[in-house]
Each structure stands twice: as structure tokens, then as C-alpha cells.
Amino acid sequence: MIAANILLLLICLFSVSGFQSFTVPHSKISSTSSLLATRGEVIKAAMALPLAILPLTASAAALPSSKPPVVLVLGASGRSGMSTIEACLKRSIPCTSATRTGSDPFKVVKLDKSYYTPYPSPVDVTDLSSLKAVIEAVKPTAIVYAASASKKGGNAQEVDYGGVKNVVEVLPKSTRLVLISALAVDRPDSQGYKMTNSMGGVVDGIMYQKLRGEDEVRKKVKDYVIIRPGVLVNGKDGGPVEIAQGDYLGGGLSRQELAELVVDAVEAPETDFTVEVYRKKTRTALQKEFEGQGSIIESGGSGKERFKGVVKDK
Ligand SMILES: NC(=O)c1ccc[n+]([C@@H]2O[C@H](COP(=O)([O-])OP(=O)(O)OC[C@H]3O[C@@H](n4cnc5c(N)ncnc54)[C@H](OP(=O)(O)O)[C@@H]3O)[C@@H](O)[C@H]2O)c1
């Protein structure tokens, strides 16, 4: 029953993802709380702003360079991308947002931006030259890949696989790549995989393409972390988050919880591993026969130590 609910939620959320709604941090409540606005409302509000507050330049010099790491978020206008920027800023980690359109996702959002730089030009993950340009300008110590198929940005093959492949191609050797993927991509026989993979439209085949993207990273990147979240829900509090390996277990968590994990992965001493993440209380076997299987990491809360005990992929 729980598994069925999670599956249903997974399908609903994947189908909503990037199309109908857009979570924006609300400036007047707090920097981390959210409200649901339509994409049209956000764009209208952004367009109403005077040119004087359009994005700053993104030269490396504009970043507080004395405080590594420097995080570059690709697909930063997405809900997890924005949450990742917020999570970085909470820890005073310098970060740059890069978006497909080149517009600053935080233009209409009030938050402490001392460590934040919006990259002022479009960065389309399907376009190698735009990726090279932003990496050259920002010189990130870590890149977070938060892009995923969207109506205007490209389908799953182009974004969830092709975009990742492009990043792998231009990634500097000294830069860590944190890839946001999805759990169950390794389980083509699971119901979750089958249903999510066959939704049609731009997200058709998304599980297959995500696994191809992951494989590209595991094969070619020297310093990476692959985070496979479960169903992404709105709202912040949900009890402890669990980290698992092997793709046996799933569940749900919020984008804020995911973002904290992503930033922990940026800072973690461990590297080259793949993990599934979900709230402990939502833990469900991805297939009935997986009950009791799966290696669970007792993380003991957020922070860069939370991945202690993970097993490397290679
Ligand atoms: N939703 C779920 O329940 C769920 C579950 C497990 C895993 N995931 C995965 O978690 C990740 C984050 O999900 P989310 O729902 O927070 O993301 P999201 O809001 O859908 O954001 C995706 C972002 O990718 C951008 N993008 C699309 N094409 C691009 C391109 N060619 N170049 C650059 N950026 C591009 C989109 O920008 P535009 O809109 O401007 O095109 C959008 O900002 C995704 O990989 C998703 O598949 C989601």
C-alpha cells in the first residue's frame, strides 16, 4: 500500500516537474520558506524589474575567492537548483547560478546574496560552448547538475543524458561533479521505473536517460557524487533523511532536504559514490523481493560527515 502511494506520488511529481508550478522562496517570510507561484507569474514579476538590478557580472573576481569551495549550479532556475543555492548561502559557500535563459532565478527574491553571483548569460547544458564559458568564468571547485528535461530546454535524452555527457566532457580535473539523478534508475523491472519511464512527452524515457548520464559520470569523472532522490515533495520538515546504496530502497523527501544533501556532497571528504536518499519514515522496498535488502548509511544528520561509511563505486 505504502509502495503504491509512493509510486503514485512519484508519477504525479515527475509529471508536474518543470511544467505547471514553480517553487519560489518568499522574500517576506524568510529566505528558505516557499510559496507556489505559476511560472508565468514569476516571469512577469521578473520582467517588471528595472534594468538597474539585472545580474552582476560573473567574473571569478566577483566571487569571494578566498573562501573555497565555489559552487556552480547548472539548471539553477529549477526548484532543486534554487534550493541548492539557498543551502550554499546558508553555509556562506560562494555560489553561482547558471540558467538556460541567462536570467537570475533570485531576481525577485530577497535573501542574503553576499556569496551569490548569477551568471549573466544563458547556459544551456546541450550547448558545449556555453558550458565551457561559464566554467572558465567561474572556475568552480564543484558543479551541481540540477537540470532536467523541460519543454523549452530539451527532452530527457538531450538534458538528462546529453547535458550530463557535455558537462563530463568539459569538467576540469580538479572540479567535483554532484549529479542529481533519481532512485530506481537501476531497477528497470520495478514498477516505479516502468511507470516513470513511460510518461511520454519530453520526459519519456527519463529513467533510462538518467542511468546513461550516471554511467557517463561513473566511467569518466575523477571526483563525483551521484545523489538519487526519491519523490520530491514540498515542505521542509519530515524527520531524519536516510542514505542507502544499491538501489533497493526508496521514499520521498523535500527539495530543501535534497539541497542540504547536495551541499554536504560538495563538502564531503568521501568521493566517487552513488547514493539513494529519502526520509527514513518513508522507506519502501523498490520491489517486493527487496524487503530487508539495501545498505543503509546511518548519517546522523546533515553536514559533510553524513556520507561516512559509503561504499565507492569503483
Ligand atoms: N520530481 C520528482 O519527484 C523527482 C524525483 C526524483 C528525482 N528527480 C530529479 O531531481 C532533479 C531536480 O528536480 P526538480 O523537480 O527540482 O527540477 P525542475 O524544477 O524540473 O528543474 C529542472 C531545471 O532544468 C532546467 N533545464 C532544462 N533544460 C535545460 C537545458 N537545456 N540547459 C539548462 N537547464 C535546463 C530547467 O530550466 P527551464 O525550465 O528554463 O527549461 C529547470 O530549471 C531532476 O533531475 C529530476 O529529474 C525528481
Image: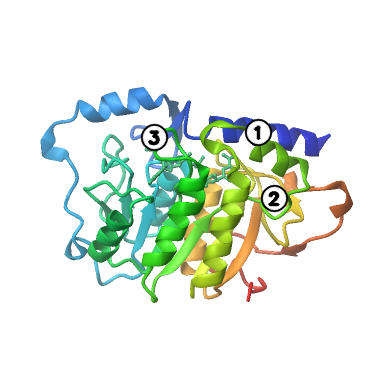
Disc 1 C-beta below 8 A from ligand 1: no
Q: Residue at x 72, y 57 (%)?
A: 247
* 12 with respect to 224 (left or right): right
| CB atoms of marks 1 and 2 within 8 Å | no
* Residue 11's disc number: 1
Residue 114, horizontal then vertical, whole percent: 25, 54
Alpha carbon separation for disc pair 1 and 2: 13 Å
Residue 71, horizontal then vertical, whole percent: 36, 61
First in sequence: mark 3 or mark 1?
Answer: 1
User: Quick one: SS at disc 3?
Assistant: loop
Q: Give the mark toward the camera: 3 or 2.
A: 3
The outermost residue toward the left is: 52
Alpha carbon separation for disc pair 3 and 2: 26 Å
First in sequence: mark 3 or mark 2?
Answer: 3
Quarter of the image with the N terminus is: top right
- In this orientation, does residue 240 appear? no
* 235 with respect to 28 (left or right): right
First in sequence: mark 1 or mark 2?
Answer: 1
* Residue 184's disc number: 2
Alpha carbon separation for disc pair 3 and 1: 21 Å
Query: Identity of the amino acid at label 3?
Result: Lys
Query: Identity of the amino acid at label 1?
Result: Ile
Q: Give the mark toward the camera: 3 or 1.
A: 3
Residue 64, horizontal then vertical, whole percent: 24, 65
Q: In which quarter of the image is residue 191?
A: top right
Between 285 and 237, the one lying in front of the other is 285
* Residue 152's disc number: 3
Disc 3 C-beta below 8 A from ligand 1: yes
In the rendered image, the vertical position of residue 97 relative to residue 301, given as above or below: above
